[in-house]
Image (cartoon, rainbow, N blue to C red):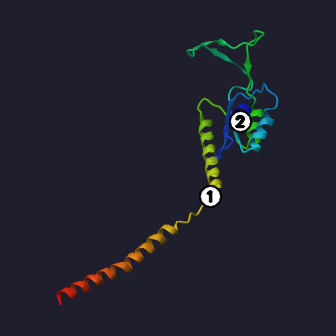
């Protein structure tokens, strides 16, 4: 959470959202407290939980993405990952977001996108600010220029007519 927070621009006014995609197992203390602090700064948290509450083995892959076996810890024990939905739900709740459980069909991604769109609509609506910019000076200057030109044009026409009339007489 703290690493994700460090990636935000402090000067930005845009909505800040963190999507955690995890099994929910916490290996560090204070995760929920860090989420609470970030939420107080306006960050919204969405969580997507992967795995099984009963636990599943964590596969390892080579550089080409081919499975090479199961991950083992420092003692040589196979690592078992368990979905901790309670923690993920708490993070989403404290973080003013929502929890989604991952599925094979991917329906949770559609639900996440819908939630983000709703959040974005709300954020745009609350950040709307109307600023009136006075631009009458330009039109006033054009109107004054037209008035001056209009008063000069009839005089020129009148002088020409007088000059033509005097020459003809």
The extreme top residue here reads 76
148 sits left or right of 80 in the view: left
Image quarter where the C terminus lies is: bottom left
The part of the image, by quadrant, that contains residue 147 is bottom left
Q: What number is the disc on residue 66?
A: none
Element class at badge 1 = loop
Q: Under tag 2, what secondary structure?
A: helix
Tell me the quadrant of the picture where the N terminus can be found.
Answer: top right
Picture residue at 67% right of the left edge, 42% below the top: 16
* Residue 129: x %, y % from top left: 62, 58
For mark 2, what is the residue?
Answer: 5
Q: In screen coordinates, is 162 left or right of 118? A: left
Give the quadrant of residue 111. top right
Mark 2 / mark 1, whichever is N-terminal: 2
Please give the residue where the numbered disc 1 appears in the rendered image.
Answer: 129
Q: Nearer the viewer, residue 43 or 75?
A: 43
What is the spatial separation of the Cα atoms under label 2 and label 1, in whole angstroms?
27 Å
């Amino acid at each position: 959470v703290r690493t994700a927070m460090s990636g935000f621009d402090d000067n930005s006014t845009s909505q800040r959202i963190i999507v955690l995609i995890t099994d929910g197992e916490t290996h560090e203390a204070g995760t929920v407290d860090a989420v609470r602090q970030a939420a107080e700064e306006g960050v919204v948290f969405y969580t997507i939980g992967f795995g099984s509450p009963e636990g599943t083995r964590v596969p390892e892959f080579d550089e080409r993405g081919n499975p090479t076996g199961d991950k083992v810890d420092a003692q040589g024990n196979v690592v078992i990952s368990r979905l901790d939905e309670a923690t993920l739900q708490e993070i989403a709740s404290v973080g003013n977001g929502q929890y989604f459980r991952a599925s094979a069909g991917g329906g949770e991604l559609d639900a996440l996108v819908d939630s983000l769109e709703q959040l974005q609509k709300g954020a745009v609506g609350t950040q709307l600010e109307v600023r009136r910019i006075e631009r009458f000076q330009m039109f006033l200057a054009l109107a004054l220029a037209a008035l001056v030109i209009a008063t000069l044009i009839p005089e020129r026409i009148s002088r020409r007519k007088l000059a033509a009339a005097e020459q003809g007489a």
